[in-house]
Amino acid sequence: MGDREEILSALMDVLGEEGCGVSCEEATVFKDAEGWKMMLEGFMEPWKLGLTVAAAKARIKEYASMGFGLR
């Protein structure tokens, strides 16, 4: 499994299929000069996730716990 797929898998693990819905199916995860980012359907800007896969997974959990459009 590649890094991108690992982050997408973490997104589904944290939110589950019910909590994720279409947003996760259409999620775009990419890495640029600033690190990993995630673009979800319905949001205008990508969400910064971090420089490493581990940081990205932790940030997804953080976003979900705060209810930032996830869940």
Image (cartoon, rainbow, N blue to C red):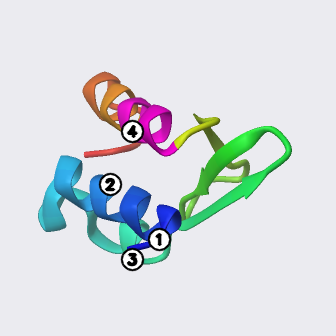
Q: CA distance from mark 4 to mark 3?
A: 15 Å
Q: Looking at the picture, tell me which residue is in the foreground, 36 or 3.
A: 3
Q: CA distance from mark 3 to mark 2?
A: 10 Å
What residue appears at the point 51 percent right and 65 percent down from the top-left corner?
A: 4
The residue carrying mark 1 is 2
Task: Specify whether 27 is left or right of 66.
Answer: right
Report the mark closest to the observer, 3 or 2.
2
Q: Which residue is mark 3?
A: 25
Circle 3 packing at 10 Å, graded few (<14), some (14-19), many (20+), is: few
**How far is mark 4 from mark 1, CA to CA?**
17 Å
- Amino acid carrying mark 1 in the image: Gly
Give the residue number, with chain letter if any, for mark 4.
60
**Residue 46, percent across and down?**
68, 49
First to last magenta residue range:
53-59
Mark 4 and 2 residues: CB-CB less than 8 Å, in contact?
yes
- Mark 4 or mark 2, earlier in chain: 2
Q: Residue at x 71, y 42 (%)?
A: 35
Q: Residue most toward the front?
A: 1
Going from the N terminus, do you reach mark 4 or mark 3 first?
Answer: 3
Q: Which residue is mark 2?
A: 11
Residue 31 image offset from top left, x and y in percent: 71, 55
Circle nearer the viewer, 4 or 1: 1
Q: Residue furthest right?
A: 33
Q: Hey, what amino acid is under mark 2?
A: Leu
